[in-house]
Structure formats: structure tokens, C-alpha cells
Amino acid sequence: MRRRTVLAMIAMVAAVAMFAAACGDDDDGGDAASTTPDGPTITLRGQDFSESVTIAEVYGQYLEAKGYDVEILTPAGFRTEAIDGLRNGDLNLIIDYIGGSQTELAPDEDTSADPAEVAAVITPLFADIGATVLDYSPAVDGDAFVVRGDTEGTTISDVADAGLKFGASSQCFERPQCFIGLTDPDVYGIEFSGRTTLEFGPLLGEALKAKEVDAVIWNTTAPQIGTEGFKVLEDDKGLFPAQNIAPIISTEVLDAYGEQLSTDLNDLSAQITTDDLLAWNTETDINKVESDEVASDWLTEKGLK
Amino acid sequence: MNLIAPLQGVSVPRNIGLWEWFSNGETWTGEGGILSSVVETLTLCAVVLAVSIAIAVPLAAVLAHHRRAELGATWILNIGRAIPTFAIAGLLVPISLTQGYGFEPWPIGIALTMLALPPIFLTTYTAVRQTDPGAVDAARAMGFTERDVLVRVELALGVGLILGGIRVAAVQVVATEPIRAFLGGEGLGRYVRDGLGQNNDSLLIGGAILVAGLATLTGLAFGALERVALPRGFRRLRQVQVQNTRTGVAR
């Protein structure tokens, strides 16, 4: 009696194992040469704002689904902490905005609105800290000079003499690509009538709506720009750098996995669009959906998970 | 490096040393410099304290004199200790913006007032409540009106304790006021805010030193005020009381 139960259990376990193995084979998308990738744990972490958190979840869950050993850490810090993490080995994959990476690593280098040029600048700089910049995505979240919808003008130059009150995060006030460039007579030469330092995020929109400020530096994929009827003025002098997203991975980890990992990451990057970023932000910031859920839904919808 | 035009952003270089930052005259007198920031901070703190004293002292004195709200006083203590000032101010900012009152001064002012009220209220309540009953009876026997008993006996005898409460409130307000810089304002918190945002350690540490220093000075200033404000006879009485408690002689 007892022996029979044991046998039945063994049979069941075997059946389940075979079934699971069969399913596992299906996951490989018919790629004949593909096996489960074998290498070190890929550790990544979003920066502490919703879009970056979602992007990290998208990349992390995608790699997990591909069979990589992935650890997605709790979001923390901003670019500096991300690059420091890459430098000291706490993280071995970050997904950053290329123009932002350049201002961090080479603040005095001229920026460009052409992503290829920016990528060419940051690639050797990341190589110096033992990291490889993979293909940048067509998805862009750039700097946006945002005004209320009823403001006269379509370009930033149009409002140079309008005496606007300016609001931005403290980072903006120390950057040549931001406040310093906007007020520099050789670039835009805007004469602002006042300035306020605001936490980056929804508060920028609140302040703009309440007319506490008349112009803010926000990001192009902020969903509130559309919902509140704000207007993004064109950067006619090309002050803002290209801000495509790109995965940057520890060269050591990349070499351990070989060609497969860079191919997989580049495949994903190529499929993300600016509209996706905007849609993700709308989900997380307006509809209050959790980032991991948003990422999971998108990957499922694209058949990547 | 620090060329300043009107409203031109002063960008403090990241690699500046702490001493270098402090010893630069521009740091003190420039636009958004330490001196003007200290004035901004102290102005708001003074208004908040004045309002808090004007509300808390009369209210607590009258309630304590009539022995009302004994439980309420304990409640106020507990609530006052539990209120996170930053959260209150942060909640009030969007409301204030949509109502057209702007970033300042209401949200931060209200939040700081809520921080200052409990210690002032409690010390006043306790001071009046604990006045020597003998002194109160004597005053009544001499024909003092109730108002005179409260003002000339209970509050007069409690002035030391009440000033202590005000000192505690003042130090807390000055030490907390810098959160204003994180809520669309300026003041002495600006250096901590910019130090964090611009990843500038000297700015961050320098700002923290300034805030701590100003809070310490506030405590010392109010401590000195307490010593000056106490009537001489009262100070002698206090010394006698202290000696009596030490020697165990009943008053």
C-alpha cells in the first residue's frame, strides 16, 4: 500500500518534470542554438523616478524571461549613484539617458542633438570604468522647456524677452545645457524675471498651473504636459542634448555571457519607442499602477515575456 | 568661476572645498548668499514664534486657571510629538497652489506653527497648573480679581517655565525651517537642497553646519533671555527652593 503511494508520487513528479521541460523548450522561440544562458547574476536598479523604475523593470523582466540570472534592486538615487554603482560593482547593468550620461561624465564637452554623436562621446568614457554602451533605443525622453498653453510663441527664442518666471530642479541651475545655457547671451540669453528651485516631477506642473512660475524644465515624456494642456517650446538653438535611452553593461558580465546578451538587449532596445515611455508614465503617474505591473503587461503584449 | 549677473545662477563648483566655500566672500554676501538666507529664515521663524506664543500662552493660561482640558493638554502633547512637519507642509503646498496662495508663506508657516504650539502650550499649562496653591489663596484673600491672580501670580511665578517652553519651540522651529527650501522656498535650507541635487558635498555639509549653528545660537539666545527676564527676587526664591529640595526641607 505504502509502496504504491511512493511509486505514484514518483510517477507524478516525473510527469510534472517532463511537462515543465516541454514547456521550457517552447519558451526558446524556436531558436535552435539557444540554450539557457549561463553566467554571473545581472544586477540592475532603476533611478528614483517612475520612468526609470519602469525601464529597469522592463529590461530586468525581459532578461529573466530569457533565462538570465537577474536581480532587480529597489530603486534608489539618480544618475550619479547609478554610475557609481556600475563603477564599484554593486550594479552591472544600468539603463540611462545618453545625454545625461555625457553631462555627468564630461560636463564641459559640447553636447549634440544627434544621438550617434553623443553615443560616440560616452562610449570611451564608460569603457574607462569597465562598462560597454550597447545600442541606444529610438525611445527618447529629452529635456522640455514647458510653458502654459496660452503663452505666445513656439520656440524658446520667442520668449527670451517675455520676462518669464523660471522654475527647475537644482540640477538645472548648474548645467550649461540648462539654466546656464538658457541665460547665456551667446546661446538663448533669456532674461528671467525670477527663479524658483522645485523638486523635479509633478510639482513643476502644479507650479506652472498656479502661475507661480511661467516656464519649467521638465521631461518630454511627462504625461501632465498633455493632460494639463501645456506647451513644449522648440529648442531652436539645439541646447538640449539627445536623450535616447541605452543600456550600459559591465564589460566583464558582457564577456561572460558572450554575443547572446548584447543581441538580446539590443533587440529589446530597438522595440521601445518614445510613445511607450509616455504610455508607461501615464500608467504609473496618472493611473497609479505599479511599475513592475506596467512593465510586465507591456512585455506580454509585445510577446517578449 | 562665480561670475554673477542679476538672476544669473550661481553654480558652486562640485570640487570646491568646504573651507574654500566658507571663506569666499561671495558665499556670504552674493545673491542667495548666507547672510540674506539667514535673514529669510529668521524672519519666518520670528513670525511663526510670535503667532504661536500669541495663540498658545493665553489659551493654555485660561484653560489651566479654570482647570479645564486636563486630558486635552495631554492629547496636544502626544499629537504634537507625532506630527511630521514635512508631511504637513508637503500636503498643504498643492492645496495652497490651487487656491492661488502660492508656495509661501502659508504651507510652511502653518506646518511650523503646528510644531511650535505644543511645547509652548504645555509649559504654560503646567506652569499655571502647578503654581503654589498658598500663593494663589493669599492673592485671593488680598482681594485680587481672578484675572489678577492669573496674570500677576500664576503667570508671573511660571515665567521661567514658560520661557523654557518658548526656547524649546524656537530651537525646533529654526532647526526645521530649512525644509522650506524643498517646497519651493529659499532660506537657509537652500544649500542642503542644492548640495543634494547637485551632488556637491561641500555645499551639503556647509549647509548642514549653518542650520545646526543657527539652531544652537537660537537656544543660547533664549537661554540668556530667560536669565535676564526673571525678576531678581524670583531668582532668589528659586535658589531657596532648589536648596530646600536638596536638603529635603518642606516648603
Image: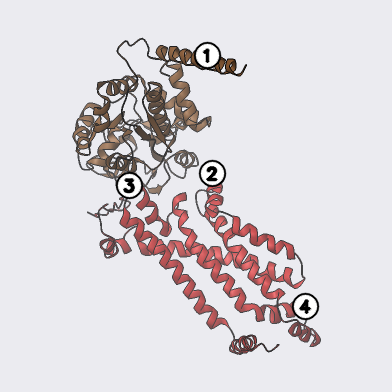
Chain colours: A brown, B red
Q: Chain of mark 4?
A: B
Please name the amino acid that badge 4 sits on: Glu
Which residue is the site of mark 1? A11
Which residue is the site of mark 2? B94
**Residue A53 seen in this snapshot:** yes
Q: Residue at x 62, y 63 (%)?
A: B118
Q: Are marks 2 and 3 in contact (CB under 8 Å)?
A: no
Q: Secondary structure at mark 4?
A: helix
Image side of residue A43 versus residue A129, left or right: right
Query: In this rendering, which labeled residue sits more in front, label 4 or label 1?
Result: 1
Q: Residue at x 30, y 43 (%)?
A: A84
Mark 3 surroundings within 10 Å by alpha-carbon count, few (fewer than 14), some (14 through 19), many (20 or more): many
**Quadrant where the C terminus of chain A is found in the figure:** top left
Give the mark nearer the N terminus: 4 vs 2.
2
Q: Which of these two is toward me, A83 or B131? A: A83
Mark 2 surroundings within 10 Å by alpha-carbon count, few (fewer than 14), some (14 through 19), many (20 or more): some
Please name the amino acid that badge 2 sits on: Pro
Looking at the image, is B116 positioned above or below residue A289?
below
Mark 1 surroundings within 10 Å by alpha-carbon count, few (fewer than 14), some (14 through 19), many (20 or more): few
Q: Position of residue A289 (x, y in %)?
A: 52, 30
Q: Are marks 4 and 2 in contact (CB under 8 Å)?
A: no
Q: Are marks 4 and 1 in contact (CB under 8 Å)?
A: no
Q: Position of residue A122 (x, y in %)?
A: 22, 34
Alpha-carbon span between mark 4 and mark 1: 93 Å
Which residue is the site of mark 4? B146
Image side of residue A32 versus residue B113, left or right: left
Image side of residue B229 versus residue B156, left or right: left
Alpha-carbon span between mark 1 and mark 3: 68 Å
